[in-house]
Image: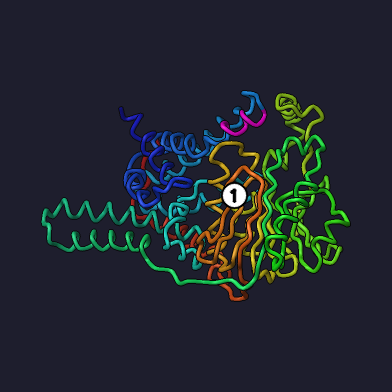
Amino acid sequence: MQLWIPLLLGIALALCLPPTPLGFLAPLPLIWLLTRGGFGFGLLAGIGFWAVHLIWLPLSFVVLFETLWGAVPYLPLVLIKAAIWGAVFGLTRGRPLARAGLWVVQEYLTSLWEIAFPWGFLGYALVDAPGRVLSSVGGVYLLSLLVLVVALSLHYGWQRLRSEGVIFSAPALGLAGIGLFWVGLWLMPLPAVEGSEKALLVQGNINPLRKLEGISAEQTYFEITRQGLQAHPETQVVLWPETAVAGFSPELVTLLGHRELISGLETGTTNRAVRLFSGQITHFYDKNRLVPFGENFPWSTALSSVYTFFFRALGFEGGLGSRTPGRGYPPLDKYGAFICYESVFPSVARALVLGGAEVLQLGSNDAWYGPSFGGLQHFQMGRLRAVETGRWLLRAGNDGVTAIIDPYGRVTARIPQRQPGFLAGQFALLQSQTLYVRWGDWAVVLAGALGVLGLRIRAKGTIV
């Protein structure tokens, strides 16, 4: 029975993160996860959490590639992520404060280096709460720390209340205050905002495997754009998703007229976003944070036989090569264009705004997620980039989610997934900088300090 406890707690925590609406319950499983066990407990809790949180991976890849080999990467990924939890739990056995601090630190570390995979951050439990506005101060890492501190406070408050046995006491008032604070994050009002600019976002719903076979999507995007501009001639900018086309026809230039186009462009070597205006590409941005084992294949020499086997199993007889990453984060004029996977990296949107971006534009191709909830989970996490930077976010997805998000993280307009269409909506150009844009990931430093303090409070014990 003890083996099932951490597994169930991990599963419960996973169900509190996007795309479910149960984020308000996140502190409850964390009360036990912060205060119990060592390495083995953390490993089992991690297996439960990551097995549920990433279940979209086998669900999407098996359907998309029509082979069970598509599920193979799922198991090692779950075990690796669970082992990281185990290490944190082992190091902080019996030291809840240290565990809370180092939990945030390990979240930050998973966003670094070549094989970064920054999924499962606890701060995303607040993505549907108005309290997400606090990410404009310290990013998603501050939200993660906040969720953990609320859980710890509930634990210590309950422990004191039980020991004193007095209902009307300081611990009882403290518990009530913590509860009211948490509820307030979900009920607090947000100011209304309006946009004066008009955008047309195009969703082509193109099968990504057919594109790899050489099928052009340009006619599809041209036709949907034509329909959208007929219905909304006041449009000022048209947005196409990631790798939408490999080139732009003269007919498109005529159709656009005085309007700008921000589009993904397939170059063969880079994953590029461009600004097209008056028939000329005036700016371009190459994706910096490439998808590990999807756009970038680490250790290709040492693992060449493994890569070859899986490429063939998934139907890529000719193999796949790594794309060339970009260098730096230049905006496309006033548009901070970033691409798909980069939306889960707070540092990318921050760098674009520091470079002068007045609105964020995300081109994505979540059709790789297939019928799973992976695309929706990806969308929910990316919403916080708007809040962190205080910018409108225009999200054009190949098969969705195509939406407009305001600087407070509210979805102001959206169209259904997995069908072609267009979305017309308003946004605004902004120049102010949030505290997160100015100060960066200071919440990680604070979490690290809490972790070190927690480790010093109690002598080191066993980690198993």
SS at circle 1: loop
The stretch in magenta equals 58-65
Q: Which residue is mark 1?
A: 401
Vertical position of residue 38 compared to residue 108: above or below: above
Residue at 53%, 46% (x, y): give it: 377
Answer yes or no: is residue 46 visible. Answer: yes
Quadrant of the rendered image containing residue 263: bottom right
Residue at 59%, 28% (x, y): give it: 71
Q: Quadrant of the C terminus?
A: top left
Vertical position of residue 84 compared to residue 449: above or below: above
Q: Position of residue 55 (x, y in %)?
A: 52, 35
Vertical position of residue 59 compared to residue 327: above or below: above
Residue 167 appears left or right of 329: left
Residue at 56%, 50% (x, y): give it: 379
Q: Is residue 335 covered in magenta?
A: no
Q: In the orientation shown, which residue stands out farthest toward the front?
A: 230
The amino acid marked with disc number 1 is: Val
Nearest the viewer among 201 and 90 is 201
Quadrant of the rendered image containing residue 239: bottom right
Q: Is residue 62 covered in magenta?
A: yes
Q: Position of residue 328 (x, y in %)?
A: 74, 61
Q: Quadrant of the N terminus?
A: top left
Q: Main secondary structure of the magenta part?
A: helix
Vertical position of residue 58 compared to residue 188: above or below: above
Residue at 74%, 32% (x, y): give it: 302
Residue 101 appears left or right of 281: left
